[in-house]
Amino acid sequence: PSENGSGGGGERSASLAGPPVLENSVQKIDVNPPKGTRDFPPEEMRLRSWLFHNFREVSRLFGFEEVDYPVLESEALFIRKAGEEIRDQLYCFEDRGNRRVALRPELTPSLARLVIQKGKSLSLPLKWFAIGQCWRYERMTRGRRREHYQWNMDIIGVPEVTAEAELISSIVTFFKQIGISASDVGFKVNSRKVLQEILRSYSLSENLFAKVCVIIDKIEKIPIDEIKKELNSVGLPQEGVNKLLEVLSIKSLSELEEILGGAGEAIADLKQLFSLAEKFGYSEWIQFDASVVRGLAYYTGIVFEGFDRAGKLRAICGGGRYDRLLSTFGGDDLPACGFGFGDAVIIELLKEKGILPELIPQVENIVCALDHDLQGAAATVATMLREKGQSVDLVLESKPLKWVFKRAARINAQRLILVGNTEYIKGMVSVKILSSGEQSEIKIDELE
Ligand SMILES: CC(=O)Nc1cnc2ccccc2c1
């Protein structure tokens, strides 16, 4: 079959024949979307648009530029050998050109690909944001969703932790903007350089680092014995395993400094981050937590995750520094950090807090011809209002007034404009303000 997916010659392949016709009735197709995916009918779409509007508003406040990439990428972009869950659940397949492709499970590798593609033509630092649908293929045994939308913000070309501090500030701004406070959520902050410094002291090679982080990230999801077994299996000696687990339970930066010594970068980065948090004014939002490593292989430094203080929900968002990602794709070494913020947990949180916004459909005018031969006149009135920037729901067929009032109420029209003969020949229409019931006749060219 040809590249564009159309059928072959005369014969029509089953997929193009449509649902089977049984005698004089067509078998009903499955009207639900594919497993793990969602439709967005108007009510759900209003909530999604509200969420994305807030993502965009914060991105604007922080001077970030919007970008996007194809939802379909080469599978190679996501093939990492660190044992990540995101790899096991890759929504991948071979296309009709025999290419291995995948629906993107995250946005960061696409960002890295585009930055390398653009190369020297980009002036650093880059501050890019995207809101994109991401996919995973999970056995439906877990009944979890196979797609979600993620807001990503990334800063490329800034080695200092001022970049991470800025990113956390943007998420704090977002939370405050939608009514979430520091008593509702917080950020656990850590640095993977802690693990790196420990593994170095056991002279463990760098590529084990990513695997160890991915294993440690599962510490609250699988039994500790399993964690120890997996750490042993990647070659970490028992003494190193114990040292790691000891470090993960450290509760404060000063305690960490005692264990690691004050010389390492981990301590310096974390101290600088907490001091910057003070200056940004979000100190009460963040806390050091040595057990947070996040589950993505490519993080190399500061990592953070937003959590609900009631402890009922999964992580709300997460991110960190990934200074090596671009070089693993053959690009120049460029410092980078960013975060992902999914569209699911945040809505659960707003529901928990009882602060979901009430979003109603809104239209300024509903325009209706009082009889059929005034349909054209109604269209003229609607167009004139639209040219003035007014929204109009134009009644497109002859309907009884009772129907029109019912529809006006359902779509929350602010005013009803009736185009009737007696008024129209005077160049006027009858206008009814639906909230007050006030009715008046207005010259058409004086409508606004
Ligand atoms: C709570 C939720 O929907 N999580 C979710 C849903 N779909 C995904 C798809 C790809 C990667 C991560 C995903 C995560």
Image (cartoon, grey):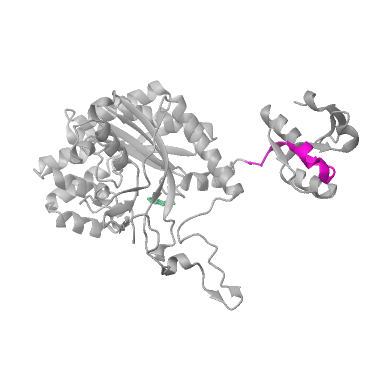
- Magenta segment range? 358-379
Give coordinates of residue 259: x percent, y percent. Answer: 19, 36
Q: Is residue 325 left or right of residue 346?
A: left
Choose between 27 and 178: the one closer to the eye.
Answer: 27
Q: Residue at x 87, y 30 (%)?
A: 440
Q: Is residue 443 above or below residue 230?
A: above
- Residue farthest along the bottom direction in this orientation: 23
Residue 160 appears in the picture as rendered = no
Residue 370 appears in the picture as rendered = yes
Instruction: State yes or no: residue 99 in magenta.
Output: no
Give coordinates of residue 396: x percent, y percent. Answer: 73, 46
Give coordinates of residue 85: x percent, y percent. Answer: 30, 54
Give coordinates of residue 242: x percent, y percent. Answer: 18, 50
Q: Is residue 203 left or right of residue 155?
A: left
Q: Give the position of the C terminus as an image quadrant.
A: top right
Q: Is residue 167 above or below residue 143?
A: above
Choose between 224 and 421: the one closer to the eye.
Answer: 421
Q: Residue at x 28, y 40 (%)?
A: 290
Q: Give the position of the N terminus as an image quadrant.
A: bottom left
- Residue farthest along the front direction in this orientation: 10
Q: Is residue 12 above or below residue 145?
A: below
